[in-house]
Image (cartoon, helix red, strand yellow):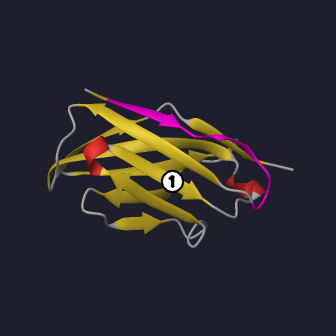
Amino acid sequence: QVQLVESGGGLVQPGGSLRLSCTASGNIFSSNAMGWYRQAPGNQRELVATITNGGITDYADSVKGRFTISRDNAKNTVYLQMNSLKPEDTAVYFCTLDQLYSPVLNESFWGQGTQVTVSS
């Protein structure tokens, strides 16, 4: 089993910055991708950013140029540096880990979520 623990959420003013962290523990497979999704009230959960264990990244258009995803493979930890935050970034942010067992078999795990609120 895999557990994901997130930290770093909170309240920040528009234009401010926050850094989210997520550490995975348990049976971590060598081939995996970690990432962040978010869900605002009344909205569907949406992709924010992902990063493979090889360092390949992908971002939602809405956060490109403002958010940076990175990871420390030795610590099984993924980070999301969020700059120039906007009120529309307000959401619960969820960490994910996709274990890639084969080209056709994967398993996903989710963290409990951390609240990010951007407001003056």
49 to the left or right of 24 = right
Q: Quadrant of the N terminus?
A: top left
Residue that appears at 58% across and 40% down:
8
Residue that appears at 57% across and 73% down:
65
Bounds of the magenta segment: 3-15
4 to the left or right of 101 = right
Q: Nearer the viewer, residue 72 or 80?
A: 72
- Determine if the magenta segment contains residue 23: no
Q: Which residue is mark 1?
A: 80
Q: Main secondary structure of the magenta part?
A: strand
- Determine if the magenta segment contains residue 14: yes
Q: Quadrant of residue 50?
A: bottom left
> In the image, residue 6 lies at what x, y percent?
49, 36
> In the image, residue 49 lies at what x, y percent?
46, 59
View extreme (right): residue: 120
For label 1, the SS is strand
> In the image, residue 96 lies at what x, y percent?
40, 43
Residue that appears at 44% across and 40% down:
22
Q: Work out whether residue 8 can be spotted.
A: yes
Q: Quadrant of residue 116?
A: top right
> Number of marks in the image?
1
101 to the left or right of 5 = left
